[in-house]
């Protein structure tokens, strides 16, 4: 168990029993963003009479003639997909960013400021099969997805008009995915987006103080604590971060210092495919459902060259809390004050770690 630095309260009337973060409400600081999360472990005992979600269907066809991402089908933008055999990348037919947006700034008074933003949005089909997710793909096929991620960052990063490349996947309708076909997205922008900007600030400040990357030191501390690690191999570690907000949130980290995905060696890419499959099978096995999540990679910005403080990592943000149909809502206090979670990071990691690595659909 980790040794907590338990400090006595200044209020002697509350010092009859020691503070226990596994039992008592407390807040935790996110070292990567500088923000805080409120943790309320006792709330898991409350009954739930709120909204429930519809569980996703357990089976899907290998090919869906109505799916605009399947090979050979017409897309929503009226173009036709090739008969692709592995991963397939195309420019989003309804992109949120455009490369030809006129440059400009509009400001009216103190409060009304707008800046033109240019960029590129693409879709990555992970597999030609409509019925597969990353959790159910074979490691060699996941490795092709890893290679495609790296290729997209490398290609888009060469564009002088691109300052950051964000890879992400929204998995499941509950996370806003409009199509069940296994796919992710790439949004490349001129400027550094909000979340990577926070991480850049905190990693840079830590590197200035310690002359070491924040997440490299953090991983060493997590491995020493051995409470929040979920799955690991020779090159990668997946853990529930100490400051996790979502119930079963995880952070995926390389064991060595790596700035971004294109730097990964072939064996590290193989190991990443292995770790992703093992982690995502655990997610599916938790509630025996195709587990929804939003995930994304954060690596060094593509503009500039002073990024020794950065460390490559991936975030997984799954919404499910109690079952396949009950999710965590970010409302009220979370939106107006501070993010809050019930189950502790340690409890979440223990539950994920204890799950088998054989997908539940193969045990029936």
Image: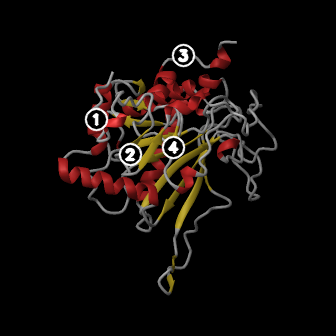
C-alpha separation, residue under disc 3 versus residue under disc 2 = 30 Å
Tally of numbered tags: 4
Checking the image for residue 356, the label placed there is 3
The residue positioned farthest toward the bottom in the image shown = 109
Q: Could you say whether the residue bearing mark 3 is in a helix, strand or loop?
A: loop
Location of residue 312 with respect to 250 vertically, above or below: below
In the picture, which quadrant includes the C terminus? top right
The numbered mark, 3 or 2, whose residue comes first in the sequence reads: 2
Q: Could you say whether the residue bearing mark 1 is in a helix, strand or loop?
A: loop
Instruction: Tell whether label 2 touches label 3 (CB within 8 Å).
Output: no
Q: Could you say whether the residue bearing mark 4 is in a helix, strand or loop?
A: strand
For mark 1, what is the residue? 8
Instruction: Tell whether label 3 touches label 4 (CB within 8 Å).
Output: no
Location of residue 112 with respect to 297 vertically, above or below: below
The numbered mark, 1 or 2, whose residue comes first in the sequence reads: 1
* Residue 56 in the image, given as x and y percentages of width and height: 74, 33
Q: Nearer the viewer, mark 3 or mark 2?
A: 2
* Residue 264 in the image, given as x and y percentages of width and height: 36, 39
Q: Nearer the viewer, mark 1 or mark 4?
A: 1
Q: Nearer the viewer, mark 1 or mark 2?
A: 1
Res 270 seen here: no
Circle 4 packing at 10 Å, graded few (<14), some (14-19), many (20+), is many
C-alpha separation, residue under disc 4 versus residue under disc 2 = 13 Å
């Amino acid at each position: 168990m980790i040794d907590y630095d338990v400090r006595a309260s200044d209020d002697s009337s509350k010092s009859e029993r020691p503070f226990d973060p596994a039992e008592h409400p407390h807040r935790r600081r996110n070292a990567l963003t500088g923000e805080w999360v409120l943790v309320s472990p006792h709330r898991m005992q409350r009954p739930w009479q709120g909204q429930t979600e519809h569980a996703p269907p357990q089976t899907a066809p290998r090919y869906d003639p109505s799916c605009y991402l399947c090979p050979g089908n017409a897309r929503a933008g009226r173009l036709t997909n090739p008969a692709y055999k592995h991963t397939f990348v195309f420019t989003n037919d309804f992109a949120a960013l455009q490369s030809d947006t006129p440059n400009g700034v509009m400001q009216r008074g103190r409060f009304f400021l707008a800046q033109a933003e240019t960029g590129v949005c693409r879709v990555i089909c992970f597999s030609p099969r409509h019925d597969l997710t990353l959790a159910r793909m074979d490691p060699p096929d996941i490795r092709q997805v890893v290679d495609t991620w790296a290729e997209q960052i490398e290609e888009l990063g060469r564009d002088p008009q691109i300052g950051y490349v964000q890879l992400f996947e929204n998995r499941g309708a509950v996370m806003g995915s409009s199509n069940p076909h296994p796919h992710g997205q790439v949004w490349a922008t001129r400027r550094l987006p909000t979340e990577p900007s926070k991480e850049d600030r905190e990693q840079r400040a830590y590197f200035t103080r310690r002359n070491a990357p924040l997440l490299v030191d953090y991983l060493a501390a997590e491995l020493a604590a051995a409470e929040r690690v979920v799955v690991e191999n020779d090159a990668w570690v997946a853990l529930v971060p100490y400051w996790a907000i979502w119930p079963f949130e995880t952070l995926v980290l390389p064991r060595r210092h790596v700035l971004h995905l294109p730097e990964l060696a072939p064996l590290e890419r193989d190991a990443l495919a292995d770790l992703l499959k093992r982690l995502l099978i655990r997610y599916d096995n938790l509630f025996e459902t195709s587990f929804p999540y939003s995930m994304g990679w954060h690596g060094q910005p593509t503009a500039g060259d002073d990024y020794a403080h950065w460390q490559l990592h991936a975030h997984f943000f799954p919404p499910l809390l109690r079952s396949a149909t009950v999710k965590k809502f970010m409302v009220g206090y979370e939106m107006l004050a501070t993010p809050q979670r019930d189950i502790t990071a340690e409890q979440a990691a223990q539950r994920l770690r204890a799950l088998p690595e054989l997908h539940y659909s193969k045990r029936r």
